[in-house]
Image (tube, grey):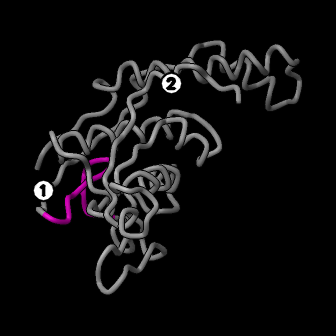
Amino acid sequence: MSYAQFFDTIETIKVKDPLSQLLGAFDTGEYEFSYLDVVKAAGHSCPTVAGAYIMTLKALEVLYRDEVAVRGNIRVEFKESLEEGVAGVIGNVISQITGATDKSGFKGLKGEFARHSLMKFDANISSSARFTRVDSGKSVDVVYNPELIKPNPKMVQLMQKLSSENANTEEVREFGRLWQDRVQRIFENRDSVVEVNLL
């Protein structure tokens, strides 16, 4: 499998999932997500997918500090509606990592391990997203601003050629390289593009 090699340099997100331990998927219930994992699930790597990954990584670092984040113990709220902009894409990535879903998720076992209703859209918040620990009520607001990392100027011309189906094979490849170059620069500047505030 061939993919952009910088994926392998990105910090993984470690979680503990009591449900996975109970059901015998992982002996200790601990596992990790890589950026490559979420790219596979999303089907692509872009500033939106990268932003969702960084937002989750940084939010969990603040919420759990020296602990391992507990999957299924995290509520996530978004200012945007599910149908607006890229909220659904961001929600899917965050759901994969945290386990939080809206009404479609796992209903639980005898009142425990429920994942549904942990994700809400159209929330009355001013940030991009709010992450809250269900057990303690501790929350962080997260703001993502990918516009701080500008795309390569060549991408406009290449996008026009792609849209008109006039791009040759090398131009298609160059567009992909430049696209992922911006994603890589977003990761390299993650402390600039993502701001986390403890409430």
* Residue depicted at 31% across the width and 53% down the height: 16
Q: Secondary structure at mark 2?
A: helix
* 174 with respect to 15 (left or right): right
Decide which of 138, 121 is in the foreground and name it: 138
The tag on residue 8 is 2
The answer to whether residue 183 is seen in the rendering is no
Please state the horizontal and vertical placement of residue 116, each as a whole percent of the image.
39, 74
Q: Nearer the viewer, residue 168 or 44?
A: 44
Q: Amino acid at mark 2?
A: Asp
Q: Which residue is mark 1?
A: 138
Residue 185 visible within the image: yes
Residue type (three-letter) at the residue carrying disc 1: Lys
Q: Earlier in the sequence, mark 2 or mark 1?
A: 2
Residue 175 location in percent, x, y?
A: 70, 20
Which residues are drawn in magenta? 123-135
Query: What residue lies at 66% left-to-right and 18% top-to-bottom?
Result: 177
Regarding mark 1 in the picture, which secondary structure is present there? loop
Residue 24 sits above or below residue 50 on the image: below
